[in-house]
Image: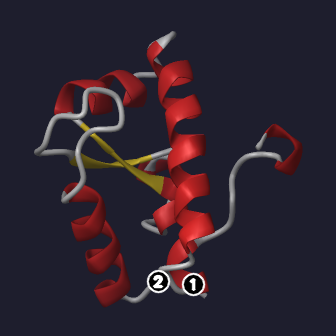
C-alpha cells in the first residue's frame, strides 16, 4: 500500500522545512535517498532527506565521496526519526540500512 497524495505532500513539506543535512543551511530540497524516485523510490519519511540543491545534484549523480557522506548522515537522521515515534508507520516506510549497521 503506497502513500496517499496528502501523506506524500505532508512528508515532503516536512523535509523541505528542515535545514540541509550536510550544510545546515535552510531552503532544502526534498531529496529522495537512498532510492531516487526515477528508480522506484517513494516519499516515505525514510526515503527522503533535506539537502541543498547542490548536494541533491551531487547525490543524484552518484558522485563519491558525496554519496558516502550523505549515507552516513541520512542513516543517523532516519534513526532519530524512528526513535522519535512522531510519524505513522505507513508514512515512515521501512529502514533501508541493515540493523547491525545502526
Mark count: 2
Residue 58 picture quarter: top left
Residue at screen point 50% across, 34% down: 73
Residue 9 picture quarter: bottom left
| Front label number (1 vs 2) | 1
The location of residue 49, given as percent across then percent down, is: 39, 49
**Image quadrant where one finds the C terminus:** top right
Q: Is residue 32 left or right of residue 14?
A: right
Q: Residue furthest top?
A: 65
Residue at screen point 46% across, 83% down: 3
Residue at screen point 28% across, 79% down: 10
| Residue under label 1 | 90
Residue at screen point 19% across, 45% down: 28
Depicted 96 relative to depicted 60: above or below: below
| Residue under label 2 | 3
Q: Is residue 17 visible?
A: yes
Q: Residues within 10 Å of mark 2 (few under 14, many from 20)?
A: some
Label 2: state its secondary structure. Answer: loop
The location of residue 32, given as percent across then percent down, is: 41, 50
First in residue order: circle 1 vs circle 2: 2
Depicted 37 relative to depicted 42: above or below: above
Label 1: state its secondary structure. Answer: helix
> What colour scheme governs how the chains and residues are painted in the rendered image of this protein?
secondary structure
State yes or no: discs 1 and 2 in contact (Cβ < 8 Å): yes
The location of residue 92, given as percent across then percent down, is: 55, 73
Amino acid at each position: 500500500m503506497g502513500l496517499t497524495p496528502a501523506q506524500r505532500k505532508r512528508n515532503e513539506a516536512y523535509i523541505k522545512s528542515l535545514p540541509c543535512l550536510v550544510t545546515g543551511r535552510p531552503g532544502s530540497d526534498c531529496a529522495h535517498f537512498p532510492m531516487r524516485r526515477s528508480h522506484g523510490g517513494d516519499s516515505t519519511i525514510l526515503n527522503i532527506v533535506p539537502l541543498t540543491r547542490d548536494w541533491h545534484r551531487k547525490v543524484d549523480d552518484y558522485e563519491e565521496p558525496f554519496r558516502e557522506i550523505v549515507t552516513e548522515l541520512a542513516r543517523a537522521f532516519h534513526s532519530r526519526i524512528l526513535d522519535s515515534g512522531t510519524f505513522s508507520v505507513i508514512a515512515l516506510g521501512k529502514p533501508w540500512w541493515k540493523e547491525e549497521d545502526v
